[in-house]
Amino acid sequence: MNDEPIIEVRGLTKHFGTTTAVDNLDLTVRRGDIYGFLGPNGAGKSTTIRMMLSLIRPTAGEIRIFGLSLAENRSDVLRRVGAIVEKPDCYLYLTARRNLDILGRLAGADVSRRTIDATLDRVGLLERADDKVKTYSYGMKQRLGIAQALLHNPDLIILDEPVNGLDPQGVREIRSLILELAQENRKTVFLSSHILAEVEMTANRMAIIANGHTVVEGGVKELLDEGTLQVSIETNNSEHARKVLANAGFTPVDNVNGKNSVIVFSMRKNDIPTAIARLAEADISIYDIGSTRSLEEYFISITGSSPQKQ
Amino acid sequence: MITPVLIELRKIFSKWHSYVGFIAIAALVPIVQVALASEGESYFRLFTQTLRNVFEFSGNLKNGYLVGFVTLNAMIAHIPLLVALVTGDLLAGEATAGTLRILLIRPPSRMAYVTAKFIAGMIYSNLLTVWLALLSLGTSVLFLGTGELIVMSSAITILPADDITWRFFYAYGFAAISMMTAAALAFMLGAFVENAIGPIAATMAIIIVFTVISALDASFIQILKPFLFTNHALGWRLFFDAP
């Protein structure tokens, strides 16, 4: 991984009549990144992706991909990009193999049977390669959508909600595929998702957008470290411990694990030693302590709305 | 450009409704042929009864040329509707299915896709005309033989057997242009909507309205007539007017 920018978005704006869908958006995606693109519904994620794929024209701003202006080098850029946009739409009246053959030819891909079969095998569709797509489940269509995005061996893969409609096994497989693409094949992956866990588990960098503009951008780990943690503490006197921490200004959180001896508080990582010190000063014995990062809380804190979870 | 056109043709011929036109022609032509072969003599006598007092008609007059002519005359007004069924779906169908988006994120330009689809639609339209020619004229000549062609319009024209082939060649060429006009209309309408039914129905409606207007003789309509493509659609008959 290096710092060479693959996608640079500067001042991107899109108006639909009087509605501003994307408002002065800035993004930088570097080579080898798995870049999570998060935002609540209506934040402008799909509109941004549609502009990045030249499906619609920006009202203002610039998109540079591989260092080239998208507006001036559309064909050269798109030759090196594979994408799923919104839904995995394919020709329902054709087989998966025929779909890949057609779409691959248009992308300038090697459409030999060996390549197509290898791509279908990679997404777990080889056994159904000769079935018409209209007989596929939504999850299978999603896999085929990913296959068509990968067939021409693109350097940049833009995936809009790639695990939608997949069962847990399918989600795991696609997650490993994304990681494999970035880590072993040195691809850059731009992953738009409303599933926080998905971004947390796969992306190394992310941006959160709200109301059409970037609210925050950076490394996933660094951004999460800035957020609050849910800290579970098991003590010998949970009632007393709850009062002590509440008086110290910490925010209690509902304990969902059902264990009466455990209390849960929301706090920043740097505040954990203080909380422990307060409990010790109150002669409360601590048996166990653990924390979970909450991207959801972080997300809500900066966008003001709740994303969906899977 | 060749690759996108070939891909479009593959897509067209992968859909069952693309064969409706071919099946309809294959079903209708034999019906017209059988009807003419069995009942044609009585119709022929009816139309020529006044002339029979003066002229004597002899030879193979109920031949393949006559059946080909009548079939073309009977079907030329309806085949554009079959063509519209496919060409109206070329853009609108992809918009409905969402596959237009997956095409547009690939290197070829929008203009390349639209041009490829248009060319493929025209090829389809012409293939349908060739199919009509093969079935209506080809099989009629094969089964009923050749002979003089008697054309009855404002006057009766009798064309010698050796002076007919080129007329059919041009007539089918003219019919092909008529069909391509309807195909282009449906294709254009398909660019404005995201539902294939709309352009197909609108093309049918335009053809019907224009045909009705073309048939009227009011003076203000005369001004419009040169601009109505349906007014020219029957121009193929002009090739059979002069001896």
Image: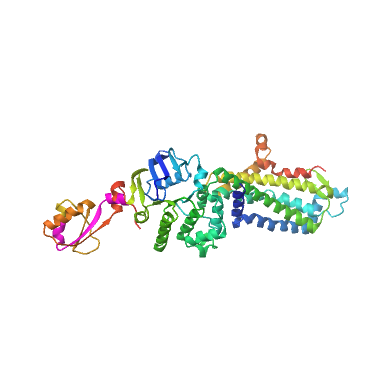
Q: How many marks?
A: 0
Quarter residue A245 falls in = bottom left
The foreground one among A196 and A304 is A196
Magenta-drawn stretch contains A226: yes
On the image, the x and y values in percent for residue A214 come to 35, 43
For the rendered model, the colour scheme is rainbow
Q: A212 or A285, which is in the foreground?
A: A285
- Classify residue A286 by image quadrant: bottom left
Residue B203 versus residue A136 in the image, above or below: above
Q: Which residues, given as a range, are shown in magenta? A: A221-242
Residue at image coords 67%, 40%:
B216
- Residue A116: x, y in percent? 53, 58
The answer to whether one can see residue B208 in this image is no
Residue B191 highlighted magenta (yes or no): no
Q: Looking at the picture, how far across and down is residue A61, in whole percent? A: 42, 38
Which of B211/B76 is in front? B76
Q: Residue furthest front?
A: A2
Position of residue A290 in the picture relative to residue B23 (left or right) = left
Question: What is the quadrant of the C terminus of chain B in the image?
Answer: top right
Q: Residue at x 16, y 57 (%)?
A: A242
Q: Is residue A142 visible?
A: yes
User: Which residue is depicted at the point 46% across and 53% down?
Assistant: A87
Q: Position of residue A106 (x, y in %)?
A: 55, 50
Residue B23 to residue A9: above or below: below
Residue A234 position by quadrant = bottom left
